[in-house]
Image (tube, grey):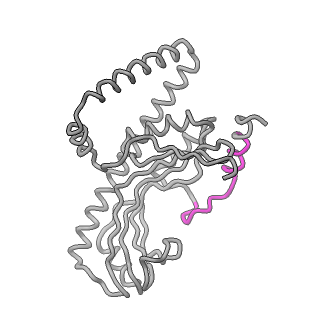
Amino acid sequence: MDRIAEFRKWKVQCLSKADLSRKGSVDEDVVELVQFLNMRDQFFTTSSCAGRILLLDRGINGFEVQKQNCCWLLVTHKPCVKDDVIVALKKANGDATLKFEPFVLHVQCRQLQDAQILHSVAVDSGFRNSGITVGKRGKTMLAVRSTHGLEVPLSHKGKLMVTEEYIDFLLNVANQKMEENKKRIERFYNCLQHALERETMTDLHPKIKEKNNSSYTHKKQRNQEKAHGQCITKGNDKELENDDHDDIGINITIFPEDY
């Protein structure tokens, strides 16, 4: 069986399985994005989260316990208010922690080139911690993720360690991160549609593709020459302008065939 046929079969098998996530369904804010990717021959999604605010009770030795073993006191994919957190905190017996977890998406790609397209779109959309993994038999996965998360302990052994005013402040920060998260998802979805549309057009018109590739090569050479002549200080100044200070290079991990 050739790789394309194998990928197609694997995709059908994976998408036909039941959703085993805690929620049991795709989050509302990423439904269209997930459906769009799954309709493309070269992609399918394996997991996703639109971003959420969590209140976890980690037990007495909380920071040594994995999230899967925690008690979920509160979880929402929408902005959160202080009263909801205060009520949920009353159920905590151990070390309660407030978290904001940003959008994450795992996509299996038919080939490395497809993953590189998604990676470029993700980085341009603000998800600068995204990376590509090539595993057994050339299976290629892209993880779209960001680093603008938040994790703050609120109680210890069931006792609240902060003021309600501070909780209100934290929620304002978390809600702002949620709003930024939503904007990045929308930007990623819009840019992805345009990128794949351009890719389809170049596949249909080989001469256009050849011209684009030639232009890209010359542009890349010019950019490399320009970058070589710039001082380190300017590069550092530009890096400080990034809101996440993430590494925007393509992160590709290659595993051996027997991995």
Left or right: 12 as drawn, with respect to 238: right
Left or right: 57 as drawn, with respect to 42: left
Determine whether 90 is above or below 116 in the image.
below
Q: Position of residue 208 (x, y in %)?
A: 51, 14
- Look at 24% across and 38% down and name the residue there: 232
- Look at 45% across and 47% down and name the residue there: 130
Number of labels in the image equals: 0
Give the camera-side residue of 144 and 227. Answer: 227
Left or right: 241 as drawn, with respect to 72: left
In magenta segment, residue 92: no
Give the camera-side residue of 253 and 2. Answer: 253
Q: Residue furthest top?
A: 207
Determine whether 247 is above or below 93 in the image.
above
Question: Image quadrant for the N terminus?
Answer: top right
What segment is highlighted magenta in the picture?
8-24
- Look at 38% across and 22% down and name the residue there: 221
Determine whether 66 is above or below 159 in the image.
above
Q: Quadrant of residue 191?
A: top left
Q: Position of residue 14 (x, y in %)?
A: 68, 50
Q: Residue furthest right?
A: 1
Q: Position of residue 225 (x, y in %)?
A: 32, 24
Give the camera-side residue of 148 and 129. Answer: 129
